[in-house]
Amino acid sequence: MEAFRIVVVLQALVCYGAKLYITQTSRPCSWTVTSPDENQRLPAFKQPLHPLATQVCQTLGCGEVYELKESAADPNSSCLTGCIHHNSTLINCSRTAAGGCMVMSEVICGNNKVRLSGGSHRCAGRVELWRAGQWGTVCDDEWDTQDADVVCAQLGCGYAISVTGQGDPYSQGRGPIQLDDLNCTGKERSLWECPAVMDDHDCGHKEDAGVVCSEYKALRLTGGQDRCSGRVEIHRNGLWGTVCDDSWDKQEAFLACAMLDCGVAKTFTGFEKPFTHKSETRWYYMCPKNPAVLWDCTEIDTSTKPHFCTDSKAAGVICNNSAGLPVPPSPKATTPALTTVQMTTAGPKVLWSLERLSCIVLSLALLSTSAFIIILCCQAKKKNEVRGKTTTRGSRKDAPRFPDQSWEELQL
């Protein structure tokens, strides 16, 4: 939440007793002092300016004075003293002699002073409020996007895209817990206008609330071997867009490397393989001389002005603290394509299949049968031979019936 500036423009009085009107501006707790004559000079005050400014801030519900800007008046000008604030005017003013007078040009009231701490950009971080002379934090109990929208709007950071709390990187602040259990509608001018618990809370700094607003600006490099090389990408509205390379030169590249703590830019153009754009926003940069950071440059959303990024590639950079971009693989020698032949066998060969075993058994049976038949044939042949001899010897008429006896023995 940006500091609420209360601008006190005190026009010189044409004559004693002319009214000075306090008119609030369009900014929260911002007011100015006017008179009917717009050509009058800023008045000088003899009285201490801080009590008068505090009175105005408190009457407007803006807390105490955070900052009072004053300067010495013209030595020849007369001074006003004794002024008080009443019903949007400064009354009871009287003139005094010139000398030692001060001109009050601007007052910033403290209750509307807000900041986001711990982030890389002013539109993201831990919510901190100033009150009673010191900075403090906001508890994340009941903290949501409606509460965070109020902070983002006051800081000129758009709207909340995410809220953070306990355990997130923005927690663990210092100082008092200024507000707890906030219940904003999202339309309030400051967190101080939202219903909340101010002092009777039970929070610690591990529960500090944080927010990332839509105008949070961040930078990263992608596609390199490390975070210090690659395509340049810019964050807005929760998305990462790319940068037109025709707006990307040595100055922008050196800023990017410095912001990322990556040294100095080594290569920022003429890449062997150009980077391509993403589908998100394409940014075009126009930088002044010697900017401190890239955000000091004018940023152009080329979706509204497409002629700024005609036929452009995405910007990239290699910082000297980087190992560089990935090395593309070397082209391999081509080899003839292999012809695939459909095998007739569906699976691996089986040595002892059922069919093979059946064939072996049948062969053995046939072999055994053949051997048996051969043996029988041989035995039959021998018997026939023996029978043939016997028949030849018995062809004599009186051949003996008993082969063991001789013929002469039988005749006796």
Image: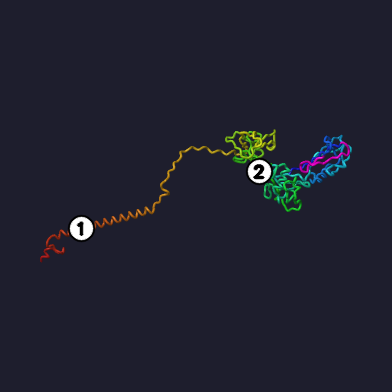
Spatial separation of the CA atoms under disc 2 and disc 1: 116 Å
| Span of residues in magenta | 14-33
Secondary structure, mark 1, is helix
Q: Which amino acid does label 1 sit on?
A: Asn
In the shown orientation, is residue 36 left or right of residue 161?
right
Q: Which of marks 2 and 1 is in front?
A: 2
Q: Tell me where residue 32 appears, x and y as whole percent.
A: 80, 40
- Establish if 309 lies above or below 399: above
Label pair 2/1, CB-CB below 8 angstroms: no
Dominant SS in magenta: loop
Secondary structure, mark 2, is loop
User: What quarter of the picture does the C terminus occupy?
Assistant: bottom left
Instruction: Answer whether residue 139 is magenta in the image.
Output: no
In the rendered structure, find residue 48 and report the number of the disc placed on it. none
Query: What is the residue that sits farthest to the bottom in this orientation?
Result: 412
Asked if one can make out residue 24 in the rendered structure from this viewpoint, the answer is yes
| Residue wearing tag 2 | 238
Image quarter for residue 391? bottom left
Q: Tell me where residue 290 appears, x and y as whole percent.
A: 69, 34
Within-10-Å neighbours for mark 2: few <14, some 14–19, many 20+: some
The front one of 258 and 31 is: 31
Color theme of the render: rainbow
In the shown orientation, is residue 172 left or right of residue 230?
right
Image quarter for residue 102? top right
Image quarter for residue 375? bottom left
- The disc, 2 or 1, on the residue closer to the chain's N-terminal end is 2
Q: Which amino acid does label 2 sit on?
A: Gly
Q: Tell me where residue 66 appears, x and y as whole percent.
A: 78, 43
Residue at x-position 71% and y-position 45%: 149
| Residue wearing tag 1 | 384
Instruction: Answer whether residue 28 is magenta in the image.
Output: yes
